[in-house]
Image (cartoon, rainbow, N blue to C red):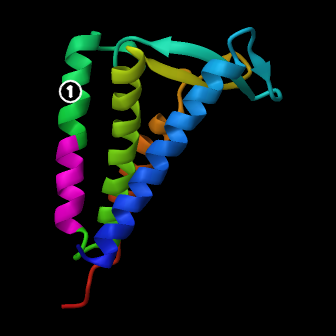
Amino acid sequence: MTPARAGLVLLAFLLVASDLGAKALARWGLRASDLELGPFLALRLRFNEGSTFGLLPAGSATWLVAGVVVFVAIFGWWFAPRSGSIALGAAVVSAGGTGNLADRWLQGRVTDFVAIRVSDWQLPIFNLADTFLVLGVLIILWPRPKPDA
């Protein structure tokens, strides 16, 4: 295994561990009540039994997420020696998918706890794994300079 690939595997492992740790802390610390951290941010323990924002039923969601995680992991592994940013984005996406998938398998549902709102507008409540998924996709899609021919 090349050092670049080993670094990506380590990064993905650390991100999954941080996500699962944050979810465990949320389940423990937010059982009694929500925690308001300011006018825009709160910690609210919620459980998602479907998939992305509860759009798909749990059974199909598990297989869909598993398939996407495997595809993105292979995609990242393939590009690791060629394009650092694509491989990095794939590792971050894989970590997010793996974190939510592991939570679903271990808890039977995904733990969400971060709530962001501005006035009456609020994002769906999410977790670190969801953040990793979005961040990883942005890294993959971020425009890169074209090499000189």
For the stretch drawn in magenta, the main secondary structure is helix
Q: Nearer the viewer, residue 28 or 100?
A: 28
Residue 55: which quarter of the image? top left
> Is residue 18 or residue 86 the one in the foreground?
18
Segment colored magenta: 70-79
Q: Nearer the viewer, residue 11 or 115?
A: 11
Amino acid found under the numbered disc labelled 1: Leu
In the image, what residue occupies the spot 78% across and 20% down?
Answer: 35
Query: Residue 78, located in which quarter of the rendered image?
Result: bottom left
Q: Is residue 143 visible?
A: no
From this view, report whether residue 107 is shown above or below residue 84: above
Q: Residue at x 32, y 77 (%)?
A: 3
Q: Name the residue beneath numbered marker 1.
A: 64
Where is residue 19 drawn, in percent x and y? 51, 38
Q: Residues within 10 Å of mark 1 (few under 14, many from 20)?
A: some
Name the quadrant of the N terminus.
bottom left
Which residue lies most toward the right here?
Answer: 38
